[in-house]
Image: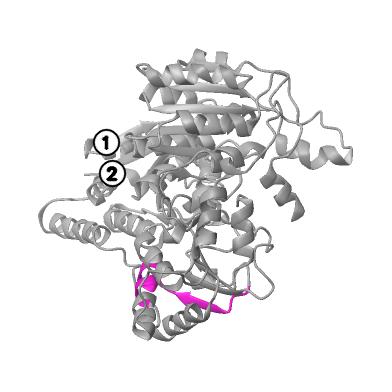
Amino acid sequence: MIVAEAVGRTLASLGAEVVFGVVGSGNFHVTNALVAHGARFVATRHEGGAATAADAYARTSGKVGIVSVHQGPGLTNAMTGVAEAAKSRTPLVVLAGEVTDPRSNFHIDQDALARAVGAVPLRVSAGADAVEQTVTAFRTAWDERRTVLLNLPLGAQADAVPWRGRLGEFLDQIVAAGRAAVAAPHPAHTVPDAREVAELAGLLAAARRPVFVAGRGARHARRELAELAGLTGALLATSAVARGLFRGDPWDLDVSGGFATPVAAELIRGADLIVGWGCALNMWTTRHGALVGPDTTLVQVDLDDAAIGLHRTVRLGVIGDTAATARAAIAAVTAEGAREPDGERGYRSPATAARIAAEGRWRAVPYTDESGGGRVDPRTLTIALDDLLPAERTVAVDSGNFMGYPSMFLDVPDERGLCFTQAFQSVGLGLATAVGAAVARPDRLTVAALGDGGAFMGASELETVVRLGLPLVVVVYDDEAYGAEVHHFGPHGHPLGLVTFPPADLAAIGRGYGFDAVTVTEPGDLSGVAEWLEGARERPLLVHARVTRDRASWWLEEAFRGH
């Protein structure tokens, strides 16, 4: 067995079920080895799409994502997606061929490239370390929730790995140990310091208006957080990436931050205690600090001690897994006061419950429909889509002025229902995000929400959607511009010719790739979406929505206040 085959066999044995990529000479053999040992290969049309799709697959499935790319330009093409994954602490292994001869056109410092975006570089230098390095890469991705670049030098890929006899038995033991560790409860599920838990319980007991804000690091902790909130009278909110975590709970405020509804913003701002659970409490989640009252006590629970207080000064930082910390706090609070999660307590009252029920979703907030003149109001469009599309859905959102509408007006069934690749704020990731999410959850209809800028950037993956037969609806919010720049610079009198574009028939482009397509210029045009949903759905659907463009979205106006 050679290195390339050993790496593929090891990853497949560890549980790598799907690998995304674009195959070149440098990753040809390792990718074939993965497939030979049971992994499914999903070919995208661009390495950037492969990295983003693998990121989205990991987020939506809860498994380690794998992406395979060529050396040099294959890796540089993938780097925006790798940066997004690294910033999001997505468990992802990037397999890349590597040229070590500086005279080669393909030579770059791939380690430095990985470090520059926050990924962890590792390398298989010879047959002797191929299995151990591969297991280390996979375990680092899983255990530490990191994005790992595993370099595969061309000169080492053909080295022998004698997977026979005693050495083979030893290598099998290494792989088996790695597989067992990944299958076991996550090592991060550790109990926090008892003194910190006691202090947290004391703060919760004293609070009159507590609010929990759960982030990516709490997506596995719904039951524990809901129980603790019930005992202490806390209202529940999430960061954008964890949206849907508390769906169905009557005390769910939905998202905290720039996306927050008026009632959510008011209630969060009125809290006397905010506890961030696996949540950065950054400028987006706190609306540049505006949602933190002057006398509000802040607590942050996180696995990473470097994350505590990084964005906002906190009264108490608790190092530990969110579910484990919540369980410990439940025990402390219950022992202290023998509380039961019934009756009026803390922030929970009939009046508050009535307000949340009546005003707690953006579609309940009154607005004036500005559709007309051949353009549809994005609020009207998205509310209608929310009513039409199946409730079991995954929503994947690109970046841009439009992004708040699908992120907030399209409901999601749970914490895996919104795939929000926005840690790097790159335009153009939305369609590839939808590809990865759809591969992870083929049982759900995936909705890709794009601006026209992102749709053109990622258009090559339209072919991927059709080729794979993915259950997908692509909605393009077309304002014929990079809308964020238009609304940022336009009011100050700056010329906008560099960020505006002539009309384009995106529906025709979609049909050219093999989509069904409808163009929406007024609410009545959405009948075409209803017809597609009622039909055989043999092909994916592209909805080209020409949206109104006279004003910035509400979330962008909030963001501008922080500039």
Query: In which quarter of the view is residue 79 placed?
Result: top right
Q: Which residue is mark 2?
A: 8
Disc 1 marks a residue whose amino acid type is Val
Horizontal and vertical percent position of residue 344:
46, 69
Q: Residue furthest right?
A: 493
Give 397 or 221, whichever is nearer the viewer.
Answer: 221
Q: Residue furthest left?
A: 165
Q: What range is drawn magenta here?
A: 313-328
- Classify 23 as above or below 298: above
Q: Which residue is mark 1?
A: 35
Horizontal side of residue 386 vs 6, given as left or right: right
Label 2: few (<14), some (14–19) or many (≥20) C-alpha neighbours in 10 Å: many
Badge 1 element: helix
Disc 2 marks a residue whose amino acid type is Gly
Horizontal and vertical percent position of residue 408:
55, 43
Q: Is residue 442 magenta?
A: no
Screen quadrant of the C terminus: bottom right
Horizontal and vertical percent position of residue 493:
89, 37
Can the viewer see residue 26? no
Horizontal side of residue 548 vs 435, given as left or right: right
Q: Residue at x 38, y 19 (%)?
A: 534
Is the residue under label 1 in contact with that under label 2 (CB below 8 Å)? yes
